[in-house]
Structure formats: structure tokens, C-alpha cells
Amino acid sequence: MALSISSYPALFSAATGVALHHLLFRHGEWDNSAPAIFGSYAAVFVGLNVLKATGPVVGFQDSNVYYLLACHLLGLFSSIIIYRVSFHRLRKFPGPTLAGVTSWYANLLSAKKLHNFEVIDKLHREHGDYVRVGPRELSIKDPRGLPFIYGPASQTTKGPFYDGAQPYISVHSTRDKKDHGRRRKAWDRGFSSKSLRDYEERVTKYAAQLLSVVADNVGQPIEMSRWFNYYSFDIIGDLTFGKSFDMLITGKDAYMLKTLHEQMQSLGPFLHSTWILGLFKLIPGLNSSYLEYFVWVKDQVENRIENVPENPDIFMQLEADFRKGKQTPKDRIHLDGEVNTGLVAGSDSTASTLTNLYYELANAPNFTRLLQSEIDLVKEPTYQELSQMKLLNAAIDETMRLHPAIPSGMQRVTPQKGVMIDDIYIPGDCIVQIPLYSVFRDERSFVKPNEFIPQRWIDRPDLVKNPSAFAPFGLGPFACAGKQLALMEIRRITWGILSRYDISFAKNQTREAFYDGQQDAFTLVCGKLQLIFTERTK
């Protein structure tokens, strides 16, 4: 054996790469193992160099370590490419050849503007409803797929994207359905009808603060994307930590908001290769912002535990769930993860929906006047009263149809037996996503799909061919727990603004600038929206 190896060291090295692919890497998930894989290669490389420096390595006496490593990698990657192109279980699905070879194809397409949802939509227009967008990743535009991939009876599980949150596991990031069900109970208590009534006064308080900002700038351009972020984040800060971030008062980004958006911008280019996040977390310098942020979260959680507010909040339910457990260091880290989930999910998607709603209202003055007529009939803007407003609810639904908060959809993994979507078979152990942006604008389900027509949800049912194709808050057990709080915030501030002001675009605000400013970083981050508010003359 030693003789054959020494005779053909390059061939042997290449063969080890092929064997490693077929015996190991083809089986299971390796996203979380990226740091260990890179570390192992580095260790082998260093080890061989050390051995060669101290004496000949058996079988490789005359071979250069760099050359042998290159041969090994050539064998490994050649095997991967050939398998993915010619033998992979997704090979029969259409899509760009390079997408089937590497997930970096889709990453590079979306990296320039971080418009992943547009990139995927274009691929669907070129290749159809089922498009291979990664080596084991399938994008499904077929609206029939929603219940099979996301519905209550779906056999799919969350994909490796959610492991990017480790070690801060939460109701959002856990991939274990039983664990999710246990964690979800605390969130459901936190958003119960009774809890929402307790939160209503605080939502009203922050709506008043935002209205004060608008009143101080009547007739002047206001960048409302920023102020809607302040509004939603101040509310969730109060409901999580018992205190506001005071952004509506100071007019400045709090540490949390600034850091979150920076991290989301970093995440955006890697939505199809989230394994790289595990590497970033371990590289000194690159991981500094991430480490500092979770130190901040930990400090906020400890401060909230020590200072219990008079008013009930979401944190009470999360802490109660934590107290029921063993309260190990791991459990404590998971509590930080739950809190972080609440901060992000309870604010960012609300802010983006508000921003897009006001973009559409400013662009549809005739409908906005109708909405104001409905608003004028409301005497007491309670949660119950506002929830009955047909035009307002229709405007919100239409906004979420055109601008879903998670435009590229949620990542899932098919069970080993695969999934049947009517007559289409999706093989097992494949990553699947339904791009909500594309499905919600599909003309097979919606007439004039790219137009803002809220009446389609009230008295124009002819404009909705397939109501089941619309699921802005998700389906099944993973559906958004904070849906009613988000709607409360949106309805309350919209009633407050439109009952007092007319809205229009600032002179320099264009549709192109607004859409170009959007970023798909799992959740949708909006571009700048310059609006002018003028007092109504009723």
C-alpha cells in the first residue's frame, strides 16, 4: 500500500476527496459543522507541514503538501459538482445549472441590491413554478404548495437557516416541533386577549408620541420609515423590558435598532449559505458586533429580572416559562434568545408593514379619502372598535399582499419520504421555500396582482381568485404569535394620523428610490419614505 501511495500521491489524494464526499458529506446536514470542517483541514495541513519539517511522511516523501491538498480538494469538489449536476435527487427540476452546483449562485445574484425576492421571482418567470435555486434547495411558486409546506398538517421541518441563531435558541429558531410547541405556550399567553387589553394603553401612549412628531413637522418632509421603526421598537422595548428605548423622544437610533439593522445587512447576502454565519461568529473582529449585542441583551434581561414593572408585559410569560425549567446556564442563554426574538419579530415586521402601508396610501389618494371617511366615524379608537374597520383592515391586508414582511418565505426541509403537492413529487431531505412575494402577486390567484386595490378584500371578490394563496402571518403551528399586537399598533397609529392629516409624497420621493432602498434580509427592511403631512379640513 505504501508503495502504491508513494507512486501515485496525487491520485491517492484526489481519491480521498471523492471518498470523503460520498461517505460523509452526502449524508446529513453540515451547515453547523462548517467551523469544525475548516478547523480540521487547517489541522491536517499544519500537521503534515510539521511532519515533513521533522522527517519524511510515509508514502509522501517527495510530495509537496500544498500540491497534495490541492489534489484532495480537486477530487472533493469534482465529485460534488458531478453528483449535483448528474445524480442529485433535484436534478430533474429546472433552474440555472450553476444554481444546482453551488448556493453562491443565488447569493451573488442578490448581493448587489439585497433584493433576493426579485431575483427568485425572475427565476420563476424564466423556469416555472418549481425552480432549483441551490444544490438541495427548491423554490416553489405554486400556490397549491402553501398547506403542504407550511400548513398545520405539513410534515416539513424548519431548515438549517434557523440554526444560525445558535446558541440562542428560541421559539422562532428551534427546529424541534415539540420544543417549539412548549415554547409557543408562553408566547400565546403573552399575546392573549387579556394581555392585549393590558398593552393597549401603552400602544396609545407611543402613538401619541409619534403624532407629536408629525405635529411638529406639518408641511415639512418627514422620513417616516425611520419614525415607524422608532414607534414599533419603543413599544416592544416597553413590553419586553418594561421601559422604552425613547427613540420617539430623542429622534435618534438606539443601540439595539442600529446594531440589528447592521447585522441584517450582513445577513442579506448569505440567505442561501447561512453556514457561513457560524464562521463569522468565531472570527475575532468580525464577531465583535455580534458578541457585544448579546452581552447587551443579557444585561437588559438581568435588569428586567431585577426590576419588575407595575404593568404586565410579555417578559413575564417568558420568565415564568424559564422558572419552570432547571434554570441551567443553557436555559438562561435560551431566555436571552427568546427575548431577542421578541425584540426583532415584534418590531421590524410591524415597521416595514407600516412604511409600505403609508407608501401605498400616499400613492392612492382616492382610496385614502375613503379610508378617512371610515375613520371619522370612529369615536373611541379602542382595539375592539378599530378591528371592525373594513377599509382599514383591507388596506393592511393589501399592503401585506404586495409587501410581505418575509418576502422570500420561510425555509423548510422535506421529510425523508418526500412531499406530494397534488401531482408534483418533492424528494425527501430537500430545502424548500415558497417565495411569498411571488405567490401573493400571482395572477392565477389575484386579478391585477401588482396593483393596490384594497376593495378586493371587501366588495370585489372577483379580484381574488384564490383566497387560500394569501397567508401573510404564516400557517399552522409556526404562524406569527404576535399578529394581533402588530395589527393593534398599525391600526392605532393609522387612525391617529389619518383622522388629523392628509398625506402626500415629498417632492424628491420617487417610487424607484423607495423600492431600490428595500433589502431582503429574511425580513423586509424598507427604504426611505419621505412624506408630507398637512392638516385636514373636514
Image: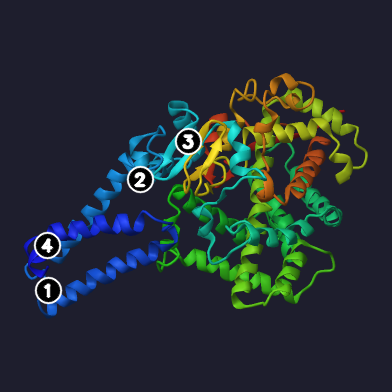
Q: Which colour scheme is used?
A: rainbow
Using the rendered view, name the quadrant where residue 421 is placed. Answer: top right
Callout 2 secondary element: loop
Q: On screen, 18 above or below 118? A: below
Q: Mark 1 points at which residue?
A: 58
Q: Which of marks 2 and 1 is nearer the N terminus?
A: 1
Q: On screen, 518 above or below 452? A: below
Using the rendered view, name the quadrant where residue 344 is placed. Answer: bottom right
Q: Report the amino acid beneath label 2.
A: Thr
Q: Distance between the residues labelled 2 and 3?
A: 15 Å
Q: Which mark is residue 262?
A: none
| Residue 302 point in image, percent of width and height | 68, 74
Q: Give the left or right position of residue 322, taking residue 403 as reference.
A: right
Q: Which of marks 4 and 2 is nearer the N terminus?
A: 4
User: Which mark is nearer the camera, 4 or 2?
Assistant: 4
Q: Which of 329 and 8 is in front in this view?
A: 8
